[in-house]
Amino acid sequence: MNILSQIRASFVRSMRIFTRDKAIIGSSIMLPIFFLLVLPLVLFQNVPAEYMPLTRGFLVIAMITLLIMSTAISNLPGSIAADRDHDLYSKLSSMPVHPVYECVGRIITVFVFSAFGSVIVLLLGFVLGAQYNVTLIDIPLILGIASVITLTSVGVGLIIVGFTKSESAAAHVGVAIVMFIYFLGIAFPYSELPELLRPLVHVNPICVGNNMIAALAIGEDFIGYNPFNIIDLTTMLTLTGLVICVGLYIYSKYCWKR
């Protein structure tokens, strides 16, 4: 099999699993939609009316980041662990299939599935009154930052599945990490975070990327700082490259054991 055939076969199979599994659709897409509808009534009911469109816009960005994390950090390792339990990798090991190319197909699945869910969340946000200050020049930059968030999340997911024994363990560890990252620096604007948590945001590529998108779409004043600085940008790109490389190595070494 050539490289493109390996990638395509892995993508088609993974995409079929993601779109047919109700648990994956529920946790990745329906849960952020539920939060998008409920959180303004629970956490932001005291926000003045003139600030509510920007608040809803920030919440939409946070929900899209949550969607990406749930897909890549929880559901991706869960599906890989399920395939491992069914001895898929024992069969693939005897075929001319390279672990990295097979994994690329899975990564593309995460990108496509997350993009589909993100469009749904974004459209619902507009219906609910979310407001953004985005120009055409900002859109490619936002998509690039979202890609970095996705790659970081994928790397974390691959690392998780390399050290967990079962599908349930992989998925549940992923959920715990998703919730930790979400409440660490995504659920609320940087300016509203406790001083103790703020340094942790700067060393987390997902949180930095989320803040960058929010700063572009809503404004630095709403976020509380300018995330587009040399330190944050360098840290985000460096850690993303490191995490995805380590994830691919662990996936190739531990998931493809005969």
Image (cartoon, helix red, strand yellow):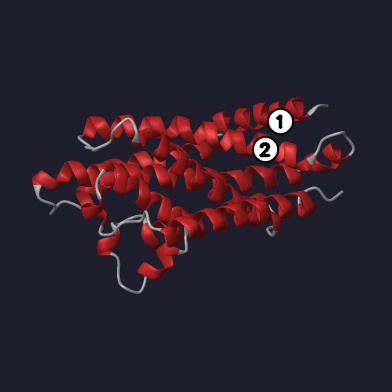
**Which amino acid type corresponds to the residue marked 2 in the rendered image?**
Val
Of mark 1 and mark 2, the one earlier in the sequence is 1
Q: Residue at position x 52%, y 39% from top?
A: 23
Name the residue that disc number 1 marks. Answer: 7
Q: CA distance from mark 1 to mark 2?
A: 6 Å
Q: Residue at position x 43%, y 37% from top?
A: 143
- Sort mark 1 into few (<14), some (14-19) or many (20+) by Cα contacts within 10 Å: many
**Nearest to the observer: residue 45 or residue 218:** 218
**Nearest to the observer: residue 119 or residue 32:** 119
Name the residue that disc number 2 marks. Answer: 104
Q: Residue 225 placed where, x, y %?
A: 28, 59
> Tag 2, which secondary structure?
helix
Look at the image and tell me whether residue 43 can be seen. no
**Nearest to the observer: residue 111 or residue 44:** 111
Residue 141 in the figure: left or right of residue 133 = right
Q: Which mark is residue 130?
A: none
Residue 29 in the figure: left or right of residue 129 = right
**Which amino acid type corresponds to the residue marked 1 in the rendered image?**
Ile
Q: Residue 32 placed where, x, y %?
A: 38, 42
> Tag 1, which secondary structure?
helix
Q: Residue 27 placed where, x, y %?
A: 47, 43
Q: Residue furthest bottom?
A: 196
- The answer to the question of whether label 1 and label 2 lie on touching residues, with beta carbons closer than 8 A, is yes
Residue 234 in the figure: left or right of residue 225 = right
Q: Is residue 214 above or below residue 181?
A: above
**Nearest to the observer: residue 255 or residue 155:** 155
* Quarter of the image with the N terminus in it: top right
Residue 53 in the figure: left or right of residue 23 = left
Q: Residue 5 placed where, x, y %?
A: 75, 25
